[in-house]
Amino acid sequence: MISMQFNSDLASDLESFVRSIQKEHRLKTIHRHLQQFDRYCIDISHDSGVFDEKVVLGFCQRIKGEAFQEWKQRQSSLRQFSYYLQLQGKYSFVPPTLSTGKGKTPIEYHSCLNKWIESLIQSKQTAGFIYENEKKFLHQFDEFLVCKGYKGDELTREMVDDYSCRPQTESWKTKQLKVSVVRILGLYMLKNGEKAYILEDLPTGSHSVPDIFGEKELTAFFQTVDSYPYCFHWCRYVYPVYFRLLYSTGMRESEACGIQREDMDFENRRIFIRNAKGQKDRFVYISDFDITMLQKYDHVMDGFFSCRKWLFLGASQMHQALTPACVRNMFQNCWKRTEASGSPTVNSFRHTYVVDKICKWQKEGRNVDSLIPYLSKQLGHKSIKETYYYCKRLDTRFPEIMTSDSLVDKINLGAYL
């Protein structure tokens, strides 16, 4: 039988938490760590009754000679206690996750261009980009160069053309991604005075007709997102706001994932998008509804992670940015629960934003052609032609989308905060 005896100013909360985890397989380990924490609070004369930053970080300091795994588990136990307090409506500081110790083996590069590859990755990550998927493609290219026996310090046309050959099992999308990364490497080398061949035209395949959400589909999806049983409780705020922001601004999924808190400019009603597609920065303008939503969201998340850098946090790596892979996975999980027809993707929010905006302008009797350049700028397109591509299904969904005068407003003002 686990003893419930705690003596610090947080004793009642500690006892209540232990009762709530009686079936937890790590009960004995967590209880041992909580007893250590209880004694620590007494030793430092902690008397505020609040699980605050000072007492948490003080207890989480690594003890001399302490094994890394034990240190990690000790912080994990306190983190679970913090989540429990937050669910009870009490303020608590969340201990940060450890990013050192045992982990994945670092990727090493051994080709003739390894120094340039490593330099590119370092420059991107220094600039604030996660650059994990790109690292994988660059590693593939590095291994390719080694296997083919390429030598020299120049990125040649032969290398690029050889690497661009598409196996039967490789999709056009994968080919485009891997060649795009090599193109970025070439541009980086040129910028730094090295010779490099640049593939101007990236490979393209046949484009499927984009899916456009109707009002019923959007309503069903957001109801599902709002009620989804997330593994991490803060995700019930992250994903509803994230998907609403995609729909109301037309942002790409990677752009929204990369938003830092300092990028939000509520006074000028805009968000700064760093190094978007084509390595170009731009501003995305937001509505009053978006501002209200984001301010509420930011305030709520402050109760969990007050020192966070990113606007949207991931589930597996707290204090790290939400990744497009996690977003796509969550979208598919939620879409299946709606039991709606069709096979949309996260990018369908971007398509719907464009069609919805044009429908609204047409209903208001405005000159759409004169407004398209502004829409193109908002979306970060190189040309107006790209913007018109998103309107392929305008004629088939026009009556359905036109039935709602304030769909954006209704979707944004959900009761999730």
Image (cartoon, rainbow, N blue to C red):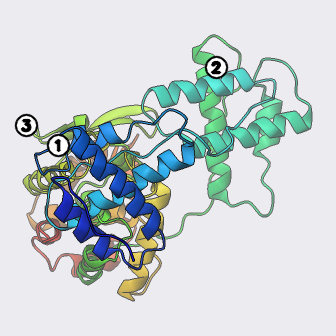
Which residue does the numbered mark 1 point to in the structure image? 46
Which residue does the numbered mark 3 point to in the structure image? 267
- Residue at image point 29% right, 75% down: 19
Q: Position of residue 36 (x, y in %)?
A: 36, 51
Distance from the alpha carbon under mark 1 to that under mark 3? 40 Å
Q: Position of residue 181 (x, y in %)?
A: 62, 38
- Whether residue 233 is situated above or below residue 147 in the rendered picture: below
Quadrant of image for the N terminus: bottom left
Q: Residue furthest top?
A: 193
Q: Nearer the viewer, mark 2 or mark 3?
A: 3
The local crowd at label 3, few if under 14, some if 14 to 19, many if 20 or more residues have their Cα within 10 Å, is few
Q: Nearer the viewer, mark 2 or mark 1?
A: 1
Q: Position of residue 144 (x, y in %)?
A: 82, 40
- Whether residue 111 is situated above or below residue 323 in the rendered picture: above
Residue 241 seen in this snapshot:
yes
Q: Amino acid at mark 1?
A: His
How many marks do you count on the picture? 3
Place residue 199 in its image quadrant. Answer: top right
SS assignment at label 3: loop
Task: Name which of mark 2 and mark 1 comes first in the sequence.
Answer: 1
Q: Amino acid at mark 2?
A: Met
Distance from the alpha carbon under mark 2 to that under mark 3? 39 Å
Q: Camera-side residue: 47 or 7?
A: 7
SS assignment at label 1: loop
